[in-house]
Image (cartoon, helix red, strand yellow):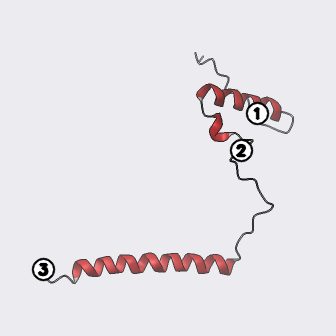
Amino acid sequence: MSDDPILKDVILKDRFTYPNWFLSLRFNAFLRGVWHLIDPDAPDVNRSTGLRKFPTLEEYTEEANARLRKQYTEVLAAWQDIHNDPD
């Protein structure tokens, strides 16, 4: 048995256990001084403006290829600088 006085075993199982789970989460976060980091009602929280738009497969592939191409050219340039140096 743990000597820790903070209750940790409230498990979120369904919507009926949410109130107890949330109270336990908030209580534990306050005791540990981290509630300000996870408070969903904090004034500086970015509120959702609706469903997030996911990129199409083509958009995602194009962005990933561009990022990898840039990384490749940077690494290649660094390698060439090292190996083409006449010293």
- 3D distance between C-alphas at marks 3 and 2: 59 Å
Image x and y of residue 39, in percent: 70, 39
Which quadrant: the C terminus? bottom left
State whether residue 76 is above or below residue 48: below
Mark 3: which amino acid?
Answer: Asp
In the picture of the structure, the residue carrying the numbered disc 1 is 22
Of residues 4 and 22, the one nearer the viewer is 22
- How busy is the neighbourhood of tag 1: few (under 14 within 10 Å), some, or many (20 plus)? some
Q: Earlier in the sequence, mark 3 or mark 2?
A: 2
Name the image quarter holding residue 73: bottom left
Considering only order in the chain, which callout, 2 or 1, is on the residue closer to the N terminus? Answer: 1
Q: Quadrant of the N terminus?
A: top right
Residue at far right of view: 16
* C-alpha span from label 3 to label 1: 65 Å
Tell me if residue 53 comes above or below residue 66 in the rendering: above
Q: Secondary structure at mark 1?
A: helix
The residue sitting at 36% across, 76% down in the picture is 75
Label 2 crowding class (10 Å Cα cut-off): few <14, some 14-19, many 20+? few
Residue 47 drawn at (x, y percent): 75, 53
Closer to the eye: label 3 or 2: 2
Residue at left offset 68%, top offset 47%: 44
* Residue nearer the viewer, 42 or 79: 42
Mark 3 lies on residue? 87
Q: Is residue 36 above or below residue 78?
A: above
Q: Nearer the viewer, residue 4 or 53?
A: 53
> Under tag 3, what secondary structure?
loop
- Inter-mark Cα distance, 1 to 2: 19 Å
The image quarter in which residue 15 lies: top right
Q: Quadrant of residue 80?
A: bottom left
**Amino acid marked by disc 1:** Phe
Q: Amino acid at mark 2?
A: Pro
Residue that mark 2 sits on = 43
